[in-house]
Image (cartoon, rainbow, N blue to C red):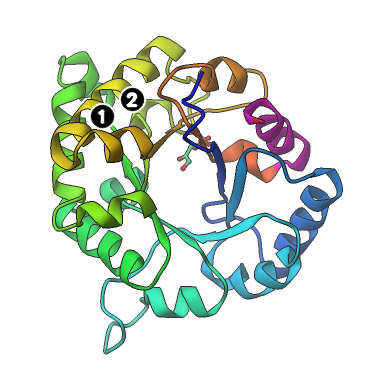
Amino acid sequence: MTSPRRRRLVAGNWKMHRTGPEAVELIQQLRDGYTPGRAEVMVAPPFTALESASRALEGSGIALGAQNVHWEPQGAFTGEISAGMLRAVGCTFVIVGHSERRQLFGETDAWVSKKARAVLHAGMRPVVCIGETLADRDGGRTLEVCSSQLHGSLAGVAVEEMNHVVLAYEPVWAIGTGRNATPAQAQEVHAHVRELLVRLFGRPVGEAVRILYGGSVKADNAAELLGQADVDGALVGGASLKAQEFLAIVAAAT
Ligand code: 13P
């Protein structure tokens, strides 16, 4: 079981799915089946649906997140969105360094750390993603790759800011493939990440930071994954687009 000091978080990363009206419809279905409980819940629709999602979530107890951010507060950055803009629309979380951004859009650890700090400075909580590829895992480099991503992605984040940071371990080979990490595989990396956090930021911080697991989390494997000592929640992709499935994952975390 997760330490009682860490409140579980179940987050839905909607990726590039749902228009504004479609987001409102999905949120309504979530609201119909959701009673706020011990676990925190967040959904991250695409940028264009944030405003309507924000209104639809009012008073629900479900938090709003964004999927990406630029680190500058404003300026000539065509196509980018700042942390202040996300805050203004009602976001309290921002996912940074998702593997799809790292792999498909060339995001580096240095960028991820700038984004995480921009999110913190705007008064929101970054969900910082790390995770190895299948080649890394097969080559026995999982822990090394995750350590290096963690170091780089949290560079410049102050100890006192760390209680607003959430980490997400998402093995790339488990994302969208239907092949989740086994609970033991997830726990091994989570425990390693926590030890690293303890070394970098001290034991109280290391033990308080939440580490989510992501990669093919479904209603039928959530309880087992969340039953691991250092798995403090889930970052859910595909299954977060189906209200009943997502609610079942939330229930498994509660
Ligand atoms: P799936 O749950 O669809 O595997 O996606 C995981 C993910 O990338 C969440 O950020």
Quadrant of residue 146 within the rendered picture: top left
Disc number for residue 149: none
Instruction: Residue at the far right: name it.
Output: 32
The residue under the point 72% across, 73% down is 55
Boundaries of the magenta span: 242-253
The local crowd at label 1, few if under 14, some if 14 to 19, many if 20 or more residues have their Cα within 10 Å, is: many
Q: Is residue 140 left or right of residue 27?
A: left
Proximity of marks 2 and 1: CB atoms separated by less than 8 Å: yes
Circle 1 sits in a helix, a strand or a loop, which is it? helix
Let me know if residue 127 appears in the view. Answer: no
The residue under the point 29% across, 59% down is 116
Q: Is residue 48 magenta?
A: no
Return the x and y of residue 11 as percentages of the image width and height. Answer: 55, 45
Residue 77 vertical position relative to residue 47 in the rendered view, above or below: below
Return the x and y of residue 21 as percentages of the image width and height. Answer: 75, 68
Query: What secondary structure characterizes most of the magenta part?
Result: helix
Tell me the amino acid under the disc marked 1: Val
Q: Is residue 201 left or right of residue 52?
A: left
Quadrant of residue 74 within the rendered picture: bottom left
Instruction: Residue at the far bottom: name it.
Output: 75
Instruction: Tally the marks.
Output: 2
Disc number for residue 190: 2
Return the x and y of residue 248 as percentages of the image width and height. Answer: 73, 30
The residue under the point 74% across, 61% down is 22
Circle 2 sits in a helix, a strand or a loop, which is it? helix
- Front one among 96 and 116: 116
Disc number for residue 193: 1
Report, in whole angstroms, how far the alpha carbon at label 2 lies from the one at label 1.
5 Å
Residue 41 vertical position relative to residue 218 in the rendered view, above or below: below
The residue under the point 37% across, 17% down is 187
Quadrant of residue 129 within the rendered picture: top left
Tell me the amino acid under the disc marked 2: His
